[in-house]
Image (tube, helix red, strand yellow):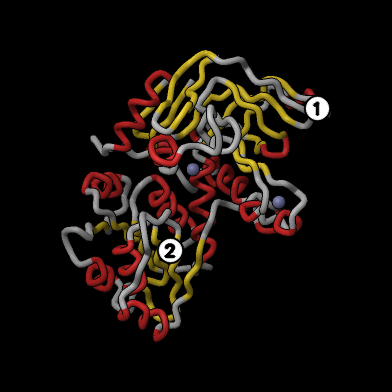
Amino acid sequence: MKACVLHAIGDLRTEEVTVPVPGPGWVLVKVAACGVCGSDIPRVFEKGTYRFPLIPGHEFAGVVDAVGEGVDAARIGQRAAVFPLVPCMRCAMCAVGAYAQCADYDYLGSRCDGAFAEYVVAPEWNLVPVPDGLSLEEAAMCEPAAVAAHALRQAKIDLGATVAIFGAGPIGLMLAQWARAWGAARVMLLDVDREKLQFARSLGYEFTSNPKEEDAVAWVRGHAPLGADVVVEGSGSAAAFEQTVQCAKPFGAVVLMGNPAGAMTLSQKAYWAILRNELRLHGTWNSSFAELRGNEWQMSLDAMAAGRIDVKPLISHRTGPEGLLDHMVMMRDRKGFFNKVMMVN
Ligand SMILES: [Zn+2]
Ligand SMILES: [Zn+2]
């Protein structure tokens, strides 16, 4: 099969490799589509994967092609999105369904082979059937959609809330959709990239602002004088962290989601704002796959199938495996506008 294999940091090659064989309890998935995650860019160009060689790619959906021992053959032909985290099922966190906090997990696309390939193997447990009428490209967006849902659920958002989101990339835009679906009265999007804001407006999010061009805190407070009920930091920049804290309403929630670009320091003024306004600061990580905590993967596919969130317009680029590296370079160098870049087979 054709696969994009990372041999060393910065050395991604599209080459022929053997199709993997599913072990007991695992299935072989024929990959239809696999999105490029923002985290794949530093993974490929700066940090590397857990080991080499390895096939990256963790935002995918496909069709079950073969099953390993102990898996019902009726699975073959089923369309599925795949939760890429493989929990140990033995630790204290796994015991309560907090798989993202597992002490000893495996991960398709960073610790073991992922889906920038024609086929990938995954545990049967990780499959979420895709509802009829939903394309596999859309289903491949289940991972970021679930991450966005998880972030927003941390805030315990209320009906009529004002929500400010720092970062208007794919996850920011999915957060915006979730916020509306959850009954937010106003959704504000902030980003330092003009084209991302223009794109957000084309999707119907008219409240957008560029912190490089105007004071972000003053702008949010211009639309919500007491501050926003929920503020999401999705950019990973310390400047945005400072602003999120300063534009939150008293007793409001700040959700910290963006992977930090460096030290995330706060001014004394911002720190005072946390104390005086009794802000709730929530970290968010990955998504929930457990019924007990609400399966955000199922939630996401259901919301897509019902039209409550629409991820299709977020796909800005499609490429085959051969063009993946060029697209990743484009993303790394920010050579043009992109939203969700997707490898399709
Ligand atoms: Zn991702
Ligand atoms: Zn575990």
Image-based side of 68 in relation to 113, left or right: right
Tag 1 secondary structure? loop
Q: Which residue is mark 1?
A: 72
Residue 9 numbered mark, or none: none
Q: Are marks 1 and 2 in contact (CB under 8 Å)?
A: no
Q: Residues within 10 Å of mark 1 (few under 14, many from 20)?
A: few
Residue ID at (46%, 37%): 48
Image-based side of 285 in relation to 263, left or right: right
Measure the C-alpha gap from mark 1 to mark 2.
43 Å
The quadrant where residue 128 appears: top right
The amino acid beneath tag 1 is Asp
Q: Quadrant of the N terminus?
A: top right
Residue ID at (77%, 51%): 90
- The location of residue 161, given as percent across then percent down, is 42, 69
Q: Is residue 226 above or below residue 291?
A: below
Q: Is mark 2 within 8 Å of ligand 1?
A: no
Residue 184 numbered mark, or none: 2
Residue ID at (39%, 31%): 10
- The location of residue 246, given as percent across then percent down, is 32, 74
- The location of residue 220, given as percent across then percent down, is 28, 68
N-terminal-most mark, 1 or 2: 1
The quadrant where residue 331 appears: top left
Residue ID at (61%, 15%): 18
The amino acid beneath tag 2 is Ala
Residue 139 can be seen, yes or no: no
Q: Nearer the viewer, residue 41 or 282?
A: 41
Q: Nearer the viewer, residue 22 or 290?
A: 22
Q: Is residue 64 above or below residue 125?
A: above
